[in-house]
Amino acid sequence: MGPGDPAVFKTVGCSNHSGRFDSCLFRMYETLPQVEALLQHPSIGKWFVHVSRPVAADVLRTTIEEFRTRIRVEEKGFDLDEIVSACEKALATISCQRLQRVINATGVIIHTNLGRAPISRENWERVGPLNYSYTNLEFDVAKGKRGKRSSFTSLLLTKMSGAEDALVVNNNAAAIFLILSAFAKRKEVIVSRSELVQIGGGFRIPDILKASGAKLVEVGTTNITTLSDYLDAINEKTAMVLRVHRSNFALRGFTEEVGVRDLKNHLPSDLLLVVDQGSGVVDRRIPSETTVARHIASGADLVSFSADKALGSVQAGCIVGKGELVAKLGKHPLFRTMRIGKTVSSLLEATLVDLLNGVDQPVGTLLFRGVAELRKTGRSILERIKSERLSLIEDTMTLGGGSTPDESLPSLSIRLESSNPRKDAQTLRLRPVPIITTIHKGAVHINLGTVMRHETEELVSALGDLVEAP
Ligand SMILES: *Cc1c(COP(=O)(O)O)cnc(C)c1O
């Protein structure tokens, strides 16, 4: 909209009771730069790589519009520098939304808001070339004809779990939806009342059952579910017993639940026993979690889990279990809507090979790093910054991602005394590499347990800048 635009005349005309055009305001409007002109400005051009030129143009248009309003309301003009600086601020705000690296100082290792498991850098680099080239994603190189997608991923998953076969989809929610749709549509699925959980943002077991066309049959109570609760609920419409990892909450006190093996031993053989294991724990060093392999060994027909939680890989949902069942899932039309591509496939394969070889992924490294190392890191940071406001305190961290909800691991935090902790936390977030912290009792906590080794230097600069700021 230019100054000659009728809408401008109208706006200006409204404020002029004489009905004549207000030439003073008109001149101030004229000083507003055109979007095209601003796009040529060197301070603006550098944002194109971050937000793209068309998005930048929209931001400029909105900002200029705001200045147009201010001219009318405040009845004064603005110089170009002021306008460019406002545009840059708006561009910075919008580019914050772009996916970017952040430093996790929250003490939650698998933080869904922060992208869950970081992927091993070695693996990322290893699979790079096959992502920017063509690959044999669905091609059998040995036979020279069409092959099966992710067949090697499945092989690795069977090795890891002891299951007969495996299938990978986009996430665990999709995995469960596929299993229910394929085997329990218009049939009944028995779930304990103690496992009707909501996991994170909007994934509710009863809702996913309903959406799949399966009928939920709740058994037991919140704290106690017995074998006979399950057995009494079985009728000719029953297709499946579904066990769900409670994920983000724990049951303590007067409780009872039935083990997978016990269930398997007593269920009629035509009923499926499916376990939503959730976190994908395969590591026996996490004693409180039942591994995927344990569930398979106990007789689960199918087990599903996320690949980007404790497994430490990319976002995907894995299904392992009986060969004929997995084959049916692979042929189901819904599977086609959930299949993974070469990026996920390549990263998941690399993670699984590592895990089978006993090589920790970043999640494992963080989990088993030990407090002694954190203390050394923490002390060296404090020695270098030397500020009354900083201290090293004992703290805890959690695995997160819906596993071990009840357990915390020892960690250390740098405590930043602050007269305005929210503002200091924001200052740390608005750095080129945002640092995400938590606030406890009026102080900012930088939990070292989730800060990766190579991020220490950035932490030192950030804290140095913060405590030295006037
Ligand atoms: C995390 C989780 C899910 C959802 O998995 P996504 O991979 O996020 O789709 C489902 N069930 C359990 C028990 C979980 O912990």
Image (cartoon, grey):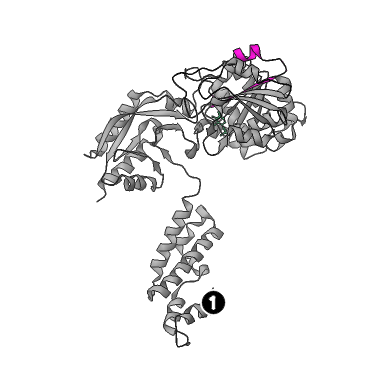
Is residue 9 highlighted in magenta? no
Tell how many labels. 1
Q: Farthest residue toward the left?
A: 388
Residue at screen point 51% across, 80% down: 9
Which amino acid lies under the numbered mark 1 shown in the image of this protein?
Answer: Ala
Rendered-image quadrant of the N terminus: bottom right
**150 or 325, which lies in front?**
325
**15 or 328, which lies in front?**
15
| Picture coordinates of residue 332, whole percent (x, y) | 74, 32
Residue at screen point 38% across, 76% down: 75
**60 or 291, which lies in front?**
291
| Picture coordinates of residue 420, whole percent (x, y) | 29, 47
**Tag 1 residue:** 7
Whether 149 is drawn above or below 38: the answer is: above
To which quarter of the image does residue 86 belong? Answer: bottom left
Whether 376 is drawn above or below 57: the answer is: above
**Residue 147 visible to the viewer:** no
Q: Quadrant of ligand 1?
A: top right
**60 or 310, which lies in front?**
310
| Picture coordinates of residue 430, whole percent (x, y) | 39, 48
To which quarter of the image does residue 436 belong? Answer: top left
Side of 250 where 177 appears, left or right: right
Q: Which residues are magenta?
A: 262-280
Q: Is mark 1 within 8 Å of ligand 1?
A: no
Q: Secondary structure at mark 1?
A: helix
**Residue 225 visible to the viewer:** yes
Is residue 271 highlighted in magenta? yes
